[in-house]
């Protein structure tokens, strides 16, 4: 059965009740889409944790090599990696007990979606989290 993204109401609820987003594939390079989206999420008041083994820090936030290295609770795992690289990331999202597994615009993986969904995570694929926040008019978080 093909994947269907959650409804706007479900996405609104997720985004309003989430505080911490781990961004897999976050880049310190301003020309990269992940850099721009991470800045947008930070500006919206989310606590964003970059996950990239090649970065020490992104936009002033300490970077981690993998999701399992993050020492705090993560609500949403937002992924900027090719679809074929996402199944093990889904496994890590399950391990850390994230609430949602979000694959950015242009990224999808039925295998990753199945793994995350079977563990009870909300799965969003081929959708930009930054654009969704704008479209759903999610207000900036309180500090």
Image: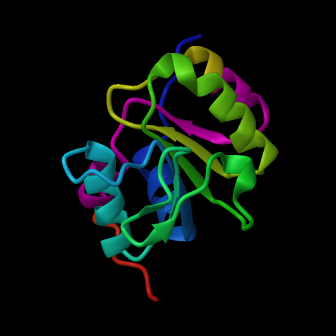
Taking the image as shown, residue 131 lies to the left or right of residue 140, namely left
For residue 119, which quarter of the picture? top right
Towards the viewer: 16 or 77: 77
Here the colouring is: rainbow
Tell me how many marks there are: 0
Which segment did they paint magenta? 113-136
Taking the image as shown, residue 51 lies to the left or right of residue 114, namely left
For residue 88, which quarter of the picture? top right
Residue 84's spot in the image, x, y percent?
A: 52, 16
x 33%, y 43%: residue? 128
Residue 131's spot in the image, x, y percent?
A: 26, 50
Taking the image as shown, residue 110 lies to the left or right of residue 132, namely right
Residue 127 lies, with reference to residue 113, above or below; the image says below
Magenta span has 119?
yes
Q: Residue furthest top?
A: 1
Towards the viewer: 80 or 128: 80
Towards the viewer: 57 or 71: 57
Residue 33's spot in the image, x, y percent?
A: 26, 44
Tell me if residue 35 can be seen.
yes
Which quadrant of the rendered structure holds the N terminus?
top right
Residue 105 lies, with reference to residue 99, above or below; the image says above
Magenta span has 14?
no
Tell me if residue 116 can be seen.
no
x 39%, y 37%: residue? 104
x 42%, y 37%: residue? 80
Residue 76's spot in the image, x, y percent?
A: 57, 53
x 56%, y 44%: residue? 53
Q: Residue furthest left?
A: 31
């Amino acid at each position: 059965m093909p994947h269907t993204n959650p409804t706007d109401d479900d996405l609104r609820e997720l985004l309003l009740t989430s505080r911490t987003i781990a961004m897999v594939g976050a880049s310190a390079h301003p020309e990269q889409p992940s850099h721009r989206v991470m800045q947008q999420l930070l500006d919206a008041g989310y606590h964003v944790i970059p996950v990239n083994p090649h970065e020490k820090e992104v936009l002033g936030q300490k970077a981690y090599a993998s999701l399992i290295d993050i020492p705090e609770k993560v609500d949403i795992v937002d992924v900027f990696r090719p679809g074929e690289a996402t199944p093990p990331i889904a496994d890590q999202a399950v391990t850390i007990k994230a609430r949602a597994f979000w694959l950015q615009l242009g990224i999808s993986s039925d295998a990753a979606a199945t793994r995350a969904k079977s563990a009870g995570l909300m799965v969003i694929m081929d959708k930009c989290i930054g654009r969704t926040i704008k479209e759903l008019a999610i207000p900036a978080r309180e500090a």
